[in-house]
Image (cartoon, helix red, strand yellow):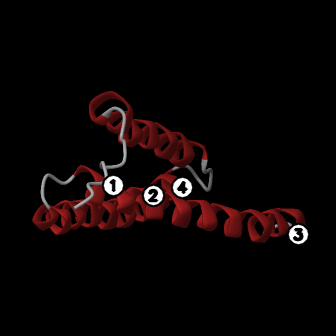
Amino acid sequence: MHSLPAVAAVVTLAPGCYASLTFAAAAVWSLPSDVAPTPGHVASIGRIQNFAENRAGVLGATTTGALVAASGGSYTAALALSGGLSIVGAAPYLLIVGRIDPLPIRSN
């Protein structure tokens, strides 16, 4: 059985985590329109991003479950792996993509 404080913490923190996830997803989905070389490439970049995001969601849940089961119910290894992979996933935006500026507005 789970203790009442642990359940209350999950119920309190889960909506904030999900809101943060939604906010980050919206920011990431705006990138294809800023970085695509032509309007025709926006959908292609979005598809690649969406495929990777969905694959990570499936593998993340499966891996977390396997690690928790293997460790006898401890989330330590799963959280450490998730944190490390989050850094690895964010690093290309910092190191490769660099500064992202809005496209200049042309007046006709």
- Asked where in the image residue 56 lies, by quadrant, the reply is bottom left
Front position in the image: 42 or 10: 42
Would residue 82 appear left or right of 3 to someone viewing this image?
left
Q: Which residue is mark 1?
A: 31
The x and y percentages for residue 58 are: 35, 67
Name the residue: 81% across, 62% down. 9
Q: CA distance from mark 4 to mark 3?
A: 21 Å
Q: Position of residue 31 (x, y in %)?
A: 33, 54
> Pointers 1 and 2 in contact (CB under 8 A)?
yes
Mark 3 Cα shell of 10 Å, populated few (<14), some (14-19), many (≥20): few
> What amino acid is found at the position of numbered circle 3 in the picture?
Leu
- Look at discs 2 and 4 and give the one toward the viewer: 2
Q: Residue 68, which numbered label?
A: 4
Q: In terms of secondary structure, where does tag 1 sit?
A: helix
Mark 3 sits on what residue? Answer: 4
Position of the N terminus by quadrant: bottom right
Compare residues 71 and 82 and report the one nearer the observer: 82
Point 33% across, 28% down: residue: 95
**Three-letter code, disc 1:** Leu
